[in-house]
Amino acid sequence: MKRGVYDIGVGWGHPADQVFAGFFREAVKKKGIEVREVTYGNLEEDFKEILAGRLSFRVFVDRSSEDHPAFALIAERLKRGGSHVVNDPVLAAKFGSKALLHELFAKEGIPVLPTVFLYPGKKTSFASFIKKERPPFVLKPSHGGGGDYVVLTARTAKDIERALQDNAPDATLLQSYLAPSSLLGRAAWFRAIFVAGTVISLWWDPHSSFYEVFASTAEEKRISQELEKIALRIAGLTGLELFSTEAALNGEGEIKVVDYVNQPIDLNVQERAPNGLPTPVVRTIASQLALRAAAFL
């Protein structure tokens, strides 16, 4: 194994990242730069070398911190050693809290839903909230993703208390349920992906998790501009370089952010999984990350 300092590295291990890794490798190679990949095939050896300071990268794209603790330790060690890591592990941890993000967004004028925070071991009355807002209510833990422990159909105080027990170690967000309006014959629900200064707006079906690229209608252009403003604002507030945010139009046609920051994002492609991203989108993400990485060299 060659030791030393490499220009660009990428850590990935999940099969869903295989196509992305190929696109990224190709995009970096076009710039005359070699990318070194840290995968399960060389994880044990590279982990030891990186922690010992014998192997490093000027720029490192971290895709697997949530897949294996060794990848998380690699990202942290490289960050401390002066590498530019995407996403910065300190920022990723800090902004993994939906409670923190909600308060930040509300303060900065990013449109969010009415929300009450319920903390373990702390008495918080939600009676006025469920009296004012119409059921059903949504409950979600402050940390985590993928829909784990999210309740979409709470209607009574007992439903809420039951959800709190399930989320006992974590703060819980109690929100009003957003029934999206219709736009161009479909539910007006979207995801915007931010990648190194570029925003990609997509239709997203919350039931099937199916993505579709925007067309060029006037309505889609308007929504895309709004999503771009929101995603750029979030990037400015958090410093994250790759994430998605979820938004929808309410009954009055107002855009509301319903899921604040998703990272790491799933970069699987639709050819391999129905809930994956369109392949051209994954290629664009890889190209933008390659541009971002090269800018640090």
Image (cartoon, rainbow, N blue to C red):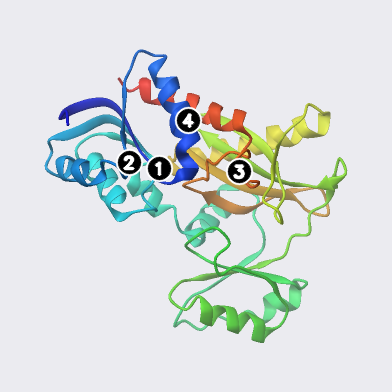
Q: Alpha carbon of mark 3 to alpha carbon of mark 1: how far? A: 16 Å
Find disc 4 in the rendering and name its residue: 196
Mark 3 residue type: Gly
Q: Tell me where residue 224 sits by quadrant.
A: top right
Q: Is residue 125 visible?
A: no
Camera-nearest label, 1 or 4: 1
Q: Earlier in the sequence, mark 3 or mark 2?
A: 2
Return the mark for residue 39. 2
Q: Earlier in the sequence, mark 3 or mark 1?
A: 1
Give how far across and how far down residue 62 sits, in percent.
36, 41
Q: Nearer the viewer, residue 204 or 172?
A: 204
Q: Nearer the viewer, residue 213 or 222?
A: 213
Secondary structure of the residue carrying numbered label 1: loop
Find disc 1 in the rendering and name its residue: 63
Camera-nearest label, 3 or 4: 3
Camera-nearest label, 1 or 2: 2
- Pointers 3 and 4 in contact (CB under 8 A)? no
Q: Earlier in the sequence, mark 4 or mark 2?
A: 2
Q: Earlier in the sequence, mark 1 or mark 2?
A: 2
- Pointers 1 and 2 in contact (CB under 8 A)? no
Q: Residue at x 49, y 24 (%)?
A: 287
Secondary structure of the residue carrying numbered label 3: loop
Mark 1 residue type: Arg
Q: Nearer the viewer, residue 1 or 173?
A: 1
Give the answer, above or below, for where 151 lies relative to 11.
below
Q: Quadrant of the N terminus?
A: top left
Q: Is residue 163 visible?
A: yes
> Is residue 215 rendered to the left or right of residue 211?
right
Q: Tell me where residue 121 sits by quadrant.
A: bottom left
